[in-house]
Every structure is written in C-alpha cells, then in structure tokens.
Amino acid sequence: MPNEPLLLDVRPILASGGQPLAAIDAAVDCLRPGQALRLLAPFRPQPLFRLMEGKGFDAHPVDLPDGGCEVLFTPREEAGDLNAASAIPSPLTWPDPVLLLDLTGRPSGEASERILATLELQTEGEVIFVLLDGEPAFLYSDLTSRRHGWVGNYDAAGETYRILIRRGASIA
C-alpha cells in the first residue's frame, strides 16, 4: 500500500536500556505527507502523546494483552507549527534562557526533582536550559501537569540531552 503506516517497534530499544526518542524522531522525519506512524511499546507511552501532538499527530492507543501498547499516530491536516494544538507558544517565540542547569552525572530522579524545584522559582514565561545524561521521559508528565512547555534533543555526539523548559502558568 502506498500510504501504509510506518512501523516502529521500540520494545527492543527499551529492553536494552536505551531511550527511543531519537528513533521516533527519525521515523517521523521519514514519513511521507499524510503517512501515519504505528508504534509498538511495552507500555502506554503517555508522555509521547503530547510530544507527538505538538508535532501535528493524533494518538490512537490500543492496549495489548501482554501489557504493551500499539499506538497509531495519524497526522492532522493543520500540522505545521510545533505547538499548533497546544496553549503553549511555539519554542521559536520563547525568550532566551535565564538559567543553565548542568545535571549531567546526576541520577534521573534527582535531576527531575531539581528541575521541578527550579521551575517553581521562575516566573511565568521564563525559560531554563538543562543538560542531562539522557532523555527525561518520566519528567514529561510532571511538566505537562504543571503546564510547562519543553523541547529537547541530543547533542551532535548523542551523549548529552539538552532541554529547554518554559515555565507555564501558575496552577491555582
């Protein structure tokens, strides 16, 4: 079929202790216009839903009997702007970071706590730049629930994960 969904199975990446975001980004970059991505994961990748929404995709998850999840990410017609579907302004319009946090060499739990505590000290709209040893996948749900925006990727060497986080509106 000419526009059959592209299949990406991230279970082997996760089983070996790796982070699948680079493979997911590469798969998205390979999609033809209008083509969907079919992702197989060992769990429901909830933080990825918002990330893919920001890239212009709707998530259609199906829980599998083995506890895994199959997600069909379908492109939306109006896709284009990184954050078109969210209330968070595009990262292209964010101000320069007010702070650099180098958390390389720290355990992921400690790094996440430090990031969240630092964000509490910022004012709405301020941006921090954080360096980490790997992608903070488990931090994404905390950022989302607190209405913070983020964009991130690995450096050219693939060794350090860089993430810009924009403080969102205070939650009353």
Image (cartoon, grey):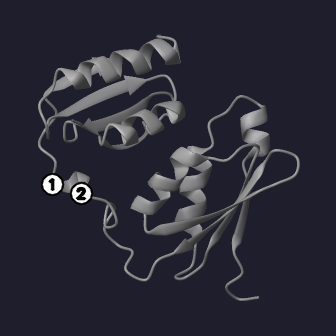
| Residue in the foreground of this view, choosing between 8 and 157 | 8
Residue 3 falls in image quadrant: bottom right
Residue position for label 1: 93
Checking the image for residue 81, the label placed there is none
Kind of residue at badge 2: Ser
The quadrant of the rendering that contains the C terminus is top left
- Residue 124 location in percent, x, y? 13, 37
Q: Is residue 3 left or right of residue 126?
A: right
Q: Quadrant of the N terminus?
A: bottom right
The spot of residue 106 in percent (x, y) is 47, 10
Can residue 33 be seen at all in this image of the molecule? yes
Give the quarter of the image for residue 77.
bottom left
How far apart are labels 1 and 2 at the CA level? Answer: 6 Å
Q: Amino acid at mark 1?
A: Thr
- Pick the residue in front: 15 or 41: 41
Say what secondary structure mark 1 lies in.
helix
Is label 1 in contact with label 2 (beta carbons under 8 Å)? yes
Which of the 4 quarters of the picture holds residue 5?
bottom right
149 relative to 49 in the view: left or right: left
Q: Position of residue 46 (x, y in %)?
A: 57, 47
Q: Residue at x 32, y 26 (%)?
A: 130
Decide if residue 158 is in sight here.
no
Instruction: Tell me: residue 33, above or below residue 170.
Output: below
Q: Under tag 2, what secondary structure? A: loop
123 vs 19, nearest the viewer: 123
> In the rendering, which numbered label is found on residue 90?
2
Identified at 24% across, 52% down, the residue is 91
At horizontal 46% and vertical 77% (from top left) the residue drawn is 76
Asked if residue 119 is positioned above or below residue 37 in the image, the reply reads: above
